[in-house]
Amino acid sequence: MAAPPLGQLVLTHLLVALFGMGSWAAVNGIWVELPVVVKELPEGWSLPSYLSVLVALGNLGLLLVTLWRRLARGKGERIPIQVVQGLSVVGTALLALLWHHETSVAGQPHSVAFLTLAFVLALACCASNVTFLPFLSHLPPPFLRSFFLGQGLSALLPCVLALVQGVGRLECLPVPTNGTTGPPIKVFPINFPERFSASTFFWVLTALLGTSAAAFQGLMLLLPSPPSVPIVGPGLRVGTPGTEEEEEEASPLQELPGQVADTTPRPDPKAHQLFSSRNASLLGLLAVTNALTNGVLPAVQSFSCLPYGRLAYHLAVVLGSSANPLACFLAMAVLCRSLAGLYGLSVLGMFFGAYLMTLAIQSPCPPLVGTSAGVILVVLSWILCAGIFSYVKVAISSMLHSGGRPALLAAGVAIQVGSLLGAIAMFPPTSIYRVFRSGEDCVDQCGS
């Protein structure tokens, strides 16, 4: 079969990446905009704890998708994907209009509109993992990596937008003893106003999500027909030598979606079942890595970074987010298919994660605070930790891809369940027992 035109290949990869960008952009955008909205909403700095609970409740989206599959067997993923994208676009547009509205509840003002819309967006984002990934079973494996590249952008682009907005800009100014003369005795933090409002931020986020939805419609037009034939049979063939995986590595970008529909599934008597020990290990590792990257480590990021300054915190957030798409690019060139290799990479990622957790526990006075070496180490640790775990996630999902829709559905569930368990595990130490202590802006609490 003749190789497809390069332009069509590039367009397909671009559309898949833009499609993946819409998976978690809404909730990620709300998180990075919290420093702006908490200044006006009545909940104040208790708002993040509300949001954590709402995101956890958003896992009800998994149940809704399961109910849909029961009631509409054989309908595929197109309709639930469009519902998820519609909720995301409409929800962020309404957020841009209504986020600052307050409602009296039991005599106290509350941001009911903001919290309700945040819950709707959490439902959509949680459902995306179990609708978007199964759809990709109809495309060749290289496009799965483009999807994860776009999913990385769903974290990176809101961070970059917040930096352009000027979130968290602060300067420490000394104040003299009496009036305007005398030696300074105190240093007060001065917060600079943002360059544009939260409403503008949410409108831009709406445009990004609209672009993602349009990319999915473009994909559906590009495909020869609504795909209904899986790539392989019901068995999950992971790492089976001499099969389609070696063909993929020999020519990783030479298949178009249309070619997949013409592929006749061939039974493989040696195919591994979905819950074989090897594949169960892959799903377990996928759940653990996502528990760390989506639940445990984000909960302590501010505690590990802010003692080294606002610059260190912003660099860790932005560069750590950019490590995700970079890891996807690396996976396109070199993909590890060894279970031992993936476990080794995970242990290395956990090493950096343990270092970051140690810094958070010792906050506000971690080692090397106030030094350039401390800033470099904490930022580099966040970059390497995020990059390694992102690579492991892409590699595992690519290995599961040969199992078709059931395997990628299981991968989506593992990602979501792992993220939920990680968030639940960190709620008591961060919100109840206060294991981690925050520093104060412009106050030296370490006597350096």
Image (cartoon, grey):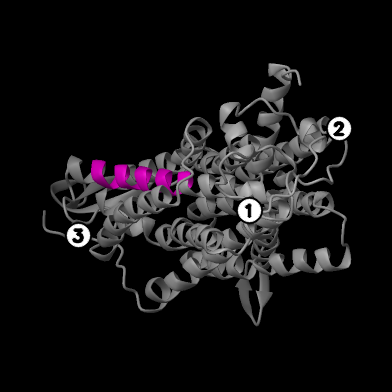
Q: CA distance from mark 3 to mark 1?
A: 56 Å
Question: In front here: 264 or 285?
Answer: 264
- Reply above or below: 176 against 157: below
Q: Which mark is residue 365?
A: 3
Q: Nearer the viewer, mark 3 or mark 2?
A: 2
Q: Position of residue 227 (x, y in %)?
A: 83, 42
Residue at far front of view: 269
Tell me the kind of residue under disc 3. Answer: Cys
Question: In front here: 107 or 156?
Answer: 156
Tell me the kind of residue under disc 2. Answer: Pro
Q: Magenta segment, which residues?
A: 376-391
Image quadrant assignment for residue 50: bottom right
Question: In front here: 417 or 430?
Answer: 417
Q: Is residue 288 left or right of residue 235?
A: left
Q: Is residue 138 magenta?
A: no
**The N terminus lies in which quarter of the figure?**
top right
- Reply above or below: 277 against 76: below
Question: In front here: 355 or 405?
Answer: 405
Work out whether residue 170 can be spotted. Answer: no
Can you identify the residue that label 2 sits on?
224
